[in-house]
Image: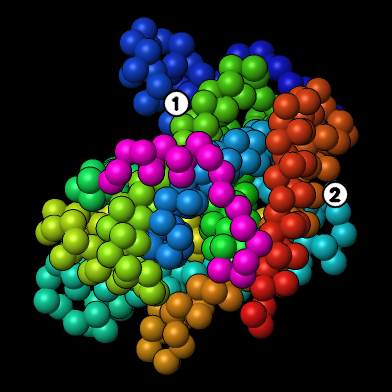
């Protein structure tokens, strides 16, 4: 059992201060807030990758304002799940895959990780294509010519950049997502319809609505975020000088409080962006009868004559930033999961020569994903099947996360409270229902 509180001398690095120590020295509340943002913010922003943006744009274009309420409902779900993943990592000092391997059968861990890698690779490939298509919206360069340079740029950052450089780059990339809020304002939506769609839930059991609802859940509560959140928390501690497992184990009240704020801020940001994407496309495309869109780039193109060049440009810029943020998180979460489950040396602060297998599992899925754009595989179908895999992966993983975070042998006194358990188990049941709903909609 891990001790939940430790003396400060055991938690401090002689070279680097912890977030708790930095926050304690900052008297300005606003500056203190920004200094504690980290893994939670990046996880939330990366959730709005091009595939997610395309899902939300399709929801707004096909169903109007009637799905706005889902942004309110998914916020506490995402927050509870991501906080549990962060807490497990902070208390155990390891990523989620290692905890899973150590405490549960490998016959559970390995199929989950295999499914995660397959879904993430397809998703990353489609996202690389979306970045190229978004750049093409702004400058007349062939989409095909952009694919390889984009993939190589992303790999260069991951392989040769330090963890701190990568983390800071990801934080700045989140700013691109504010473009979607601006695009919604250009759309000039009807306030009455917006309020009804936001606060009066609409739910129908026809195939169109149910499929869209399942897609929204699948793209907001995704398994890759669970693994990324936990592994990123471990990386944060390593960057503070806590390089041994013993130095990382346990978490103070302050550390958990700041992690909770970070996660809540990230998930709120994610859901605000989701809300405004649905709002922008509902106010324009749905109103104009343009309901058959297949991707985020098609949504941007369709918006141009309806909301003007400003909204068009903002959507394109947001899509580029979201893609450059989303792809490394997708491939990185796969690499962390594999390395942790097999006991490989891993970490973005490790030199490639010291963690060859870890970096190989970043490079290979990125290159495979990149190739999807050249071999005639429809990227929209790739995204669909990655969503299907995630839809079936998420519920059992959520069950395991709930069991881990309530196991005193693993978490000590840091087991879940009543509120987190209520939201966590509710989310698990909803995700199971969504998976069943997805099966029932097949063939309709």
Residue 294 vs 371, above or below: the answer is: above
Q: Which of marks 2 and 1 precedes in the sequence?
A: 1
* Magenta residues, start to end: 189-208
Q: Position of residue 150 (x, y in %)?
A: 29, 70
Q: CA distance from mark 1 to mark 2?
A: 31 Å
Residue 198 vs 160, above or below: the answer is: above
Q: Is residue 143 left or right of residue 243?
A: left
Which image quarter: residue 327?
A: bottom left
Q: Is residue 2 left or right of residue 35?
A: right
Mark 1, secondary structure of its residue: helix
Which residue is drawn at the image coordinates 77% and 37% (left, top)? 405
Q: Position of residue 255 (x, y in %)?
A: 58, 22
Q: Position of residue 172 (x, y in %)?
A: 30, 43
Which residue is drawn at the image coordinates 75% and 57% (left, top)? 432
Find residue 134 and name its label. none
Of residues 409 and 15, the one nearer the viewer is 409
Q: Is residue 435 magenta?
A: no
- For marks 1 and 2, give the one nearer the viewer: 1
Residue 443 is at least partly visible in this image:
yes
Residue 360 is at least partly visible in this image:
no
Residue on which the image places disc 1: 36
Residue on which the image places disc 2: 103
Q: How are the residues colored?
A: rainbow
Which residue is drawn at the image coordinates 57% and 28% (left, top)? 260
Q: Is residue 200 magenta?
A: yes
Of residues 440 and 17, the one nearer the viewer is 440
Mark 1 surroundings within 10 Å by alpha-carbon count, few (fewer than 14), some (14 through 19), many (20 or more): many
């Amino acid at each position: 059992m891990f001790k939940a509180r430790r003396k400060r001398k055991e938690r401090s690095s002689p070279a680097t201060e912890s977030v708790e120590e930095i926050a304690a020295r900052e008297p300005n509340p606003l500056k203190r807030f920004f200094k504690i943002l980290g893994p939670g913010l990046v996880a939330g922003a990366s959730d709005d990758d091009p595939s997610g943006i395309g899902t939300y744009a399709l929801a707004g274009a096909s169903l109007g304002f009637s799905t706005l309420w889902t942004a309110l409902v998914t916020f506490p779900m995402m927050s509870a799940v991501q906080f549990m993943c962060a807490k497990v990592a902070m208390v155990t000092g390891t990523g989620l895959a290692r905890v899973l391997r150590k405490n549960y059968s490998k016959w559970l861990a390995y199929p989950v990780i295999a499914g995660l890698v397959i879904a993430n690779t397809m998703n990353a490939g489609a996202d690389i294509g979306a970045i190229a298509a978004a750049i093409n919206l702004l400058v007349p360069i062939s989409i095909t010519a952009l694919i390889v340079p984009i993939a190589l740029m992303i790999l260069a950052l991951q392989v040769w950049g330090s963890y701190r450089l990568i983390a800071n780059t990801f934080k700045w990339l989140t700013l691109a997502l504010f473009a979607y809020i601006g695009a919604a304002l250009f759309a000039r939506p009807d306030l009455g319809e917006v309020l009804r769609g936001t606060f009066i839930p609409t739910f129908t059991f026809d195939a169109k609505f149910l499929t869209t609802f399942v897609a929204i859940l699948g793209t907001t509560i995704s398994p890759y975020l669970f693994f990324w959140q936990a592994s990123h928390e471990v990386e944060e501690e390593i960057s503070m000088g806590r390089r041994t497992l013993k130095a990382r184990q346990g978490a103070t009240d302050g550390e958990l409080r700041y992690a909770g704020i970070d996660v809540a801020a990230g998930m709120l940001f994610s859901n605000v962006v989701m809300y405004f994407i649905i709002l922008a496309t509902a106010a324009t495309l749905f109103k104009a009868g343009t309901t058959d869109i297949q991707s985020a780039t098609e949504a941007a193109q369709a918006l141009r004559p309806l909301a003007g060049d400003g909204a068009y440009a903002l959507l394109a810029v947001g899509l580029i930033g979201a893609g450059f943020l989303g792809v490394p998180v997708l491939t990185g979460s796969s690499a962390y999961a594999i390395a942790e489950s097999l006991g490989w040396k891993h970490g973005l602060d490790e030199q490639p020569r010291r963690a060859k297998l870890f970096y190989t599992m970043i490079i290979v899925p990125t290159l495979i994903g990149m190739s999807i754009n050249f071999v005639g595989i429809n990227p929209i179908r790739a995204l669909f099947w990655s969503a299907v895999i995630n839809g079936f992966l998420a519920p059992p993983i959520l069950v395991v996360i709930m069991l881990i975070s309530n196991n005193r042998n693993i978490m000590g006194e840091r087991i879940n409270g009543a509120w987190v358990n209520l939201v966590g188990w509710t989310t698990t049941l909803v995700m199971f229902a969504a998976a069943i709903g997805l099966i029932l909609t097949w063939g309709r």
